[in-house]
């Protein structure tokens, strides 16, 4: 009887665990559906510029609380986090979009795409942050910052530093060809480290926070 009671208790715990997991997964899927619908309703020039959307921020915060991968930077998630990610929302813009936002609108500078490429290495996670910008008369250009994420012990926080910046005409004067990039290395003494927290990760979206708590929402490309 004692064995049967233990078995019954174990089965009950397993049932409750599976039930809770199912409910959590359903909640996550519902929140992500709402999130993507609201983000896609925004023009890109609004979604990644310094203009917070409280409803979107709240949905992201709710997802962070039930993150299915609490240690997103662990080696177990290497395949999940590696690759190209498109930035689709930034609660307070990015370094590039905040600067563009200060330029008079009549100059018609447009952000075409902002993306991040991540790859694991022996020294950390290599990162390449890029933005494609359309300039009047000058055509389309790419700005890129490349560097490394050094993972912290909690495996969700990283110290980020950049060792090179690059500029490349991808469609100069709107012509259908690109030109070689100009790469500028950053000497080690001038490299600064910034805190970056990956607060949510799954197969469909990734959320990051900078040191000020600003939200960045990515999806894989």
Image: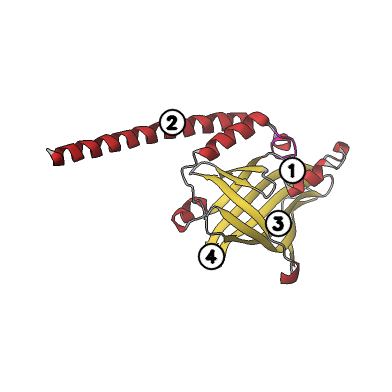
| Image height of 194 relative to 52, above or below | below
Q: Could you tell me which secondary element the residue under label 2 belongs to? A: helix
Of residues 15 and 76, the one nearer the viewer is 15
Image quadrant in which the N terminus is located: top left
Of badges 2 and 4, nearer the viewer stands 2
User: Residue at image x 88%, y 37%?
Assistant: 106
The residue stretch that appears in magenta = 47-52
Of badges 2 and 1, nearer the viewer stands 2
| Image height of 145 relative to 69, above or below | below
Alpha-carbon span between mark 2 and mark 4: 35 Å
State whether residue 181 appears in this view.
no
Q: Could you tell me which secondary element the residue under label 4 belongs to? A: strand
Residue 90 bears which disc, if any?
A: none
Q: Earlier in the sequence, mark 1 or mark 4?
A: 1
Residue 111 bears which disc, if any?
A: 1
> Could you tell whether 191 is left or right of 104 in the image?
left
User: How many marks on residues?
Assistant: 4
Residue that label 3 marks: 144
Residues tagged 3 and 4 counted as in contact (Cβ below 8 A)? no
Residue that label 2 marks: 26
Occupied quadrant, residue 185: bottom right
């Amino acid at each position: 009887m004692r064995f049967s009671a233990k078995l019954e208790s174990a089965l009950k715990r397993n049932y409750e665990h599976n039930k809770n997991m199912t409910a959590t997964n359903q909640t996550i899927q519902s929140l992500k559906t709402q999130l993507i619908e609201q983000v896609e309703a925004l023009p890109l020039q609004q979604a990644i510029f310094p203009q917070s959307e409280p409803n979107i921020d709240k949905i992201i915060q709710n997802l962070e609380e039930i993150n299915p991968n609490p240690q997103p930077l662990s080696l177990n998630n290497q395949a999940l986090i590696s690759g190209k990610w498109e930035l689709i929302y930034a609660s307070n813009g990015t370094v590039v979009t905040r600067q563009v936002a200060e330029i008079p609108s009549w100059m018609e500078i447009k952000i075409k795409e902002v993306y991040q490429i991540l790859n694991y290495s022996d020294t950390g996670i290599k990162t390449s942050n890029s933005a494609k910008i359309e300039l009047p008369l000058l055509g389309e250009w790419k700005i890129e910052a490349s560097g490394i994420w050094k993972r912290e012990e909690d495996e969700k926080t990283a110290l980020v530093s950049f060792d090179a910046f690059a500029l490349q005409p991808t469609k100069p004067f709107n012509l259908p060809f690109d030109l070689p990039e100009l790469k500028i290395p950053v000497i080690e003494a001038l490299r600064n480290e910034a805190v970056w927290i990956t607060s949510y990760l799954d197969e469909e979206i990734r959320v990051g926070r900078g040191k000020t708590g600003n939200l960045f929402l990515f999806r894989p490309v």
